[in-house]
Amino acid sequence: MAFLNKEIRDGDNQDLTEERRTATFDTDKMAEVIYGSEKLARRRREISHAVSRIPELADSRPLPFLDRFEKVTEGTRKLSVLDRHLAELIDVNDNGEALHLYHEVMGMEGHPLALHEVMFVPALIGQASDEQYEKWLGRAKRREIIGCYAQTELGHGSNLRKLETTATYTPSTQEFILHTPTITALKWWPGALGKSSNYAVVVADLIIKDKSYGPHPFIVQLRDEKTHQPLPGITVGDIGPKMAFNGGDNGYLGFDNFRIPRENLLNRHSRVEADGTYVRPPHAKIGHSAMIRVRSHMATGQGWLLGHALTIAIRYSAVRIQGFLEDKSHEVKVLDYQTQQHRLFPAIARAYAFIFCGFETIRLYDQLILDMNSNGNTSGMADLHALTSGLKSVVTHFVGQGIEQARMACGGHGYSMASYISEIYGVAIGGCTYEGENMVMLLQLARYLVKSVELVKSGKANQLGPMVAYLAVADHKVNLATGPDSYVKMFQYISKRQSWKATEKFLKFMENGDSRDVAWNKTAVELTRASRLHTRLYIMETFIRRVESVTDIPVKSALTDLLNLHLNYELLDVASYALEDGFMSSNQMDFIKNQLYSSLEKIRPNAVSLVDSFQFSDMQLRSVLGRRDGHVYQNLFDWAKSSPLNKTDVLPSVTQYLKPMMEKAKL
Ligand SMILES: CCCCCCCCCCCCCCCCCC(=O)SCCNC(=O)CCNC(=O)[C@H](O)C(C)(C)COP(=O)(O)OP(=O)(O)OC[C@H]1O[C@@H](n2cnc3c(N)ncnc32)[C@H](O)[C@@H]1OP(=O)(O)O
Ligand SMILES: Cc1cc2nc3c(=O)[nH]c(=O)nc-3n(C[C@H](O)[C@H](O)[C@H](O)COP(=O)(O)OP(=O)(O)OC[C@H]3O[C@@H](n4cnc5c(N)ncnc54)[C@H](O)[C@@H]3O)c2cc1C
């Protein structure tokens, strides 16, 4: 049965309309699965519609034509318009609605409030005591003050134990003295720090009576609340243009013996008494909870970014007509080529998969905060840290790859900023670095895997958590024809074998006399491989669970096709691990390949509807190639004509430099 794809309108490009008519499911229903609820899916549409009726919220010009200064100004302008309309547009207490509104209006170039909502407020919620809540949270939520999260320094980002900014406690005045002792101790990178924020959560090494207690979070006022001038003792500014986020003001920050009161150490979990006595937190890494939060949200956020790029690439592939298949009198849509499908469809499956497992990590994070704040229970922290460390690394890496494939799938026009794909790419791959450089975070998960294997080796397999229980058992012989479960078993086997091999290798180096750190480094590549496999297994399992739980039959059926594609694609991608010990045969490989190709064919009629289901408005897409109506060519021409270079037929630079050169050559 064909369903009406809700994107169909009169006057649209016919090739796209034809695609939309073939949908076997209702795109509104699919959107409910993608956004987690009927309400949010509906509210997103309503919010987009409401925004479209407020002309001041539109981009004043296509963003790629703006220079850095104009981007920052444009972002700030829209933010102020948005502020006036906020309560009429969204339920301000609903994060999902807020996130959508900001994406819709602000685009992805960055803006002054980006880190306020994502890290400053959450750091207060996770780390502030009740009194500090009282003092700061209301003000922050009302946006009387704007804050950011200042942790990374010029010299150190990954190795937090070596942050150089000091916060030295002085019992006589009951103050901390914040100081930047060297150039490398300058805070460097924090989003919205350079020009917008007047407050920050600053992470600094706590020193009491010459003893270092490691990094701790402090709330610090940076700028005068009236004049916005930096306070005496504060040096602050913008770090310059970046690959993306150029509407944002990532900044630097230095302290010259800057004093803050004792109450400004965020002290829900650890504190310093008036006399300098240090009270330890219930978990040594509890100060890292703002990072765990962002990492927990990254899989869904990145999945949506991939969905954004794929919406552009798939729609464009349906209106781009080039080359022949059977009928030599009619060129075909490039979407009909198997190579194009193989480039794009597995990425659609991944986008869905990442969103689904992100929902799970968000739920786990919310539970952790509830447990920590209600009864100080931090028992879920180590597991969630390991899980989100692996997930942010694997997801950002694949999302970067997927977006780049989407760009290439759009041929030459993909390279134009009219496609907007380069902006999405720049934003997405920032995620490979921020919130923990990917290799560093894969190695964090590897610690957990190695410890788990060691537990099994010492006969304590019963202490393994459910996520790693397979490390003790998985060595099944499987017949691939028996459904998703057999793929999971196969993947478990591969993943288990890699974790064990890496652990054995690491232990062997130590037996042969290497220190733990040296042995670790000699095994690091193998360890990161184990982490990736473990994470991909987790993604696969959550995808299966999510599809199983869907009740709408047509939606479930379309998702099952995507899931099958994902399972075959994933297994094929890691087949060398299974082939190397003869666990998988070349016959099985052929079987998987054939399954994969037939999945591509099955998905083909639903491809446009699968990306339409993300329900990105044209405003949010900001892409000439991805337009809902498919009218690409005239709009590309109009877009090009709006280039500032086309304001005059003859550029001053031509008159000044090029013409004299040409004239001279004539002599
Ligand atoms: C409305 C909703 C909106 C949400 C949407 C958000 C999504 C979209 C976002 C888009 C916007 C863009 C914003 C960009 C924001 C960027 C912000 C940043 O980068 S900010 C800057 C980000 N910067 C970074 O990410 C820095 C990366 N570096 C680090 O995090 C740390 O240095 C480290 C984890 C690598 C090591 O830490 P170190 O202290 O040296 O630890 P050791 O190695 O010695 O391990 C000792 C033991 O501790 C354990 N453990 C460790 N951590 C945790 C934890 N959190 N917990 C539990 N346990 C933890 C570890 O497992 C080990 O256990 P065991 O094995 O002994 O049992
Ligand atoms: C867009 C963006 C936004 C950001 N926003 C913020 C923010 O709001 N607040 C904030 O505080 N920070 C922010 N950051 C900083 C970011 O968190 C750090 O850059 C990140 O944590 C990586 O640290 P690093 O720069 O020190 O990388 P490095 O550690 O210097 O990485 C360089 C190389 O060294 C390798 N490496 C380092 N340590 C190890 C190890 N132990 N084992 C193996 N390899 C290793 C890495 O894998 C990498 O290949 C942002 C960064 C970006 C790009």
Image (cartoon, rainbow, N blue to C red):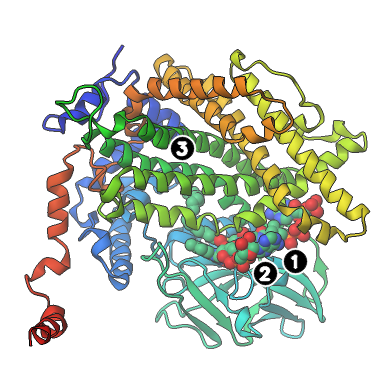
Residue 524 percent coordinates (x, y):
73, 53
Res. 351 mark: 3
Q: Which class describes the residues within 10 Å of circle 2: few (<14), some (14-19), or many (20+)?
A: many
Pointer 2: what residue? 265
The amino acid marked with disc number 1 is: Arg
Mark 1 or mark 3: name the one nearer the start of the chain: 1
Res. 234 mark: none
Residue 376 seen from this side:
no
Pointer 1: what residue? 271
Front: mark 2 or 3: 3
Which residue is rendered at x = 72% and y = 80% of the image?
A: 168
Which residue is rendered at x = 46% and y = 69% of the image?
A: 250
The reply, left or right, for residue 172 in relation to residue 289 is right
Marks 1 and 2 in Cβ contact (< 8 Å): yes
Mark 1 or mark 2: name the one nearer the start of the chain: 2
The reply, left or right, for residue 589 in relation to residue 455 is left
Residue 552 seen from this side:
yes
Q: In terms of secondary structure, where does tag 3 sit?
A: helix
Which residue is rendered at x = 80% and y = 62% of the image?
A: 280
Q: Which class describes the residues within 10 Å of circle 3: few (<14), some (14-19), or many (20+)?
A: many
Q: In terms of secondary structure, where does tag 1 sit?
A: strand
Tell me the CA gap for discs 1 and 2.
7 Å
Q: In terms of secondary structure, where does tag 2 sit?
A: loop
Front: mark 1 or 3: 3
Mark 2 or mark 3: name the one nearer the start of the chain: 2
Up the image or down, 591 lies above or below 62; here it is: above
Which residue is rendered at x = 33% and y = 56% of the image?
A: 106
Residue 1 percent coordinates (x, y):
31, 11
Q: Which class describes the residues within 10 Å of circle 1: few (<14), some (14-19), or many (20+)?
A: some
